[in-house]
Image (cartoon, rainbow, N blue to C red):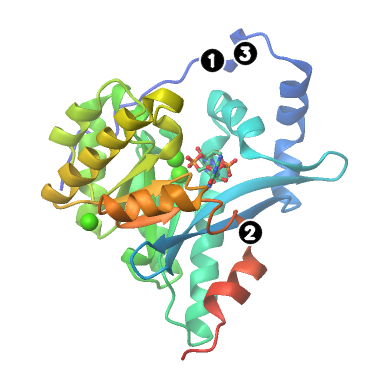
C-alpha cells in the first residue's frame, strides 16, 4: 500500500476572496467554538430495509451557537472548506466518534458502525491515513466500526491520488462509502476505477414529477450494478412510505432518511438504538 501520497494539493487562498459578513463572523468565532465544544454531533440511523432494524449511523455536525441557536452544517462547512478549517473540524468529529464507540464498548455494548464524513480537504491531506489509524489505535476500536464517507465530487480534484488514498484506507481496514454517488459528472468512471464498499445515493438526485419513472429506472439500475460489482447501496433522503416500498422492490440494501429518523443527539440515539434491551 504505498503511494504518491504527500504531494500537496493547494486549495485557493481564502484571503483573495471577498467574504460576506456572515462568513466573517463564522471565521472569527470558529476556533473558540471548537474550544468550547460548541460543535455537536448528531447521529442519523441507517436502516436495513429488509428487517427495518438500525444497522449503523452517520455522524453529522451542528454548531450550537449561543445567540444564533443550532446552525446547520450547510452554513459553515462550505466556509471551512474554503479556509481549510474543515480538516480540524473533521478530525474533531472523528475523535469524538471514536470516543463514543469506546464508551459503548466499555459499557459492554456491541456497537454498530458509525460513518463520518471526510471532506475533500481531509482526503487530500498527506497525513490522512496516519491520522485515522492513529485514532482507531488510540481508542482501541475495530477499523470496521469507523466508516468513512468520501464525496464523489472529490474524485475530480485528483483521481489518481484519491484512488491511492482509498486503497490505503481499505488496506488499513476501513470501510469506504462513496457519498452523493451520481451527483458528479463522472459517476461511471468512478465506479469503474474505484474500489469501495458502499455507494450512497441520495433520493434528491432523482428527477421528480413526470420524470419519476426515469429516476426509478436509474436508481434500480444503480442498485443492480452496485450489487453485481460487489458493493452495497445506502439510499439516503428517504422521506415517504412510498419511496421505501419502491426501494424494497428494487432490492435496495440500506436506507437513511426522515421517514425513519432525523439526525438526533447522541443521547437520544443511544436510548433508541444502543441501550435497548435485547429481546
Ligand atoms: P451529507 O453527508 O450528504 O449528509 C446527508 C444530509 O441529508 C444531512 O444534512 C442529513 O440531515 C440530510 N438528510 C437526512 N435524511 C434526509 C431526508 O429524508 N430528507 C432530506 N431532505 N434530508 C435528509 P446535514 O446534516 O444538514 O448535513 C449537510 C452536509 O454537511 C452533509 O451532507 C455533509 O456534506 C456536510 N457535513 C455534515 N457533517 C459533517 C462533518 O462532520 N464533516 C464534513 N466534512 N461534512 C459534514
Ligand atoms: Ca455523508
Ligand atoms: Ca450524501
Ligand atoms: Ca440488494
Residue designated by label 2: 264
- Residues at badges 3 and 2 in contact (C-beta under 8 Å)? no
Q: Give residue 98's position: percent from left, percent from top.
A: 49, 64
Residue 271 in percent (x, y) is at 62, 76
Q: Between label 3 and label 2, give the one nearer the viewer.
A: 2
Query: Is 262 positioned to the left or the right of 141 in the image?
Result: right
| Left or right: 79 in relation to 218 | right
Q: Which of 25 and 178 is in front in this view?
A: 178
Q: Which callout, 2 or 1, points to the residue nearer the camera?
A: 2
Q: In whole angstroms, how far apart are the C-alphas of marks 2 and 1? A: 35 Å
Where is residue 167? Give x, y as percent.
20, 45
Gap in angstroms between the C-alphas marked 1 and 3: 5 Å
Q: In this view, does 143 lie to the left or right of 210?
A: left
- Crowd class of label 3 (few under 14; some 14 to 19; many from 20; radius 10 Å): few
Q: How crowded is mark 2: few (under 14 residues within 10 Å), some or many (20 or more)?
A: some
The residue under the point 57% across, 44% down is 89
**Mark 3 sits on what residue?**
15
Label 2–label 1 contact, CB within 8 A: no
Amino acid at each position: 500500500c504505498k503511494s504518491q501520497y504527500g504531494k500537496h494539493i493547494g486549495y485557493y487562498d481564502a484571503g483573495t476572496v471577498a467574504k460576506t459578513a456572515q462568513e466573517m463572523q463564522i471565521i472569527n468565532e470558529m476556533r473558540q467554538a471548537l474550544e468550547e465544544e460548541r460543535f455537536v454531533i448528531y447521529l442519523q440511523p441507517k436502516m436495513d430495509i429488509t428487517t427495518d432494524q438500525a444497522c449503523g449511523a452517520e455522524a453529522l455536525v451542528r454548531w450550537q451557537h449561543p445567540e444564533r441557536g443550532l446552525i446547520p452544517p450547510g452554513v459553515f462547512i462550505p466556509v471551512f472548506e474554503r479556509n481549510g478549517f474543515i480538516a480540524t473540524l473533521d478530525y474533531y468529529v472523528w475523535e469524538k466518534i471514536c470516543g463514543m464507540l469506546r464508551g459503548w464498548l466499555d459499557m459492554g455494548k456491541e456497537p454498530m458502525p458509525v460513518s463520518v464524513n471526510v471532506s475533500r480537504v481531509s482526503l487530500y491531506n498527506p497525513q490522512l491515513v496516519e491520522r485515522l489509524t492513529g485514532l482507531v489505535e488510540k481508542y482501541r476500536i475495530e477499523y470496521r466500526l469507523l466508516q468513512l464517507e468520501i464525496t464523489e465530487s472529490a474524485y475530480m480534484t485528483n483521481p489518481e491520488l484519491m484512488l491511492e488514498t482509498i486503497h490505503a484506507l481499505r488496506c488499513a481496514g476501513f470501510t469506504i462509502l462513496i457519498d452523493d454517488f451520481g451527483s458528479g459528472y463522472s459517476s461511471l468512471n468512478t465506479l469503474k476505477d474505484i474500489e469501495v464498499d458502499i455507494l450512497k445515493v441520495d433520493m434528491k438526485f432523482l428527477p421528480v414529477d413526470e420524470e419519476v419513472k426515469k429516476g426509478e429506472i436509474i436508481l434500480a439500475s444503480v442498485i443492480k450494478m452496485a450489487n453485481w460489482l460487489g458493493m452495497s447501496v445506502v439510499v439516503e433522503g428517504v422521506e415517504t412510505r412510498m419511496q421505501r416500498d419502491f426501494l424494497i422492490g428494487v432490492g435496495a440494501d440500506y436506507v437513511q432518511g426522515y421517514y425513519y429518523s432525523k439526525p438526533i443527539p447522541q443521547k437520544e440515539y443511544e436510548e433508541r438504538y444502543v441501550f435497548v434491551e435485547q429481546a
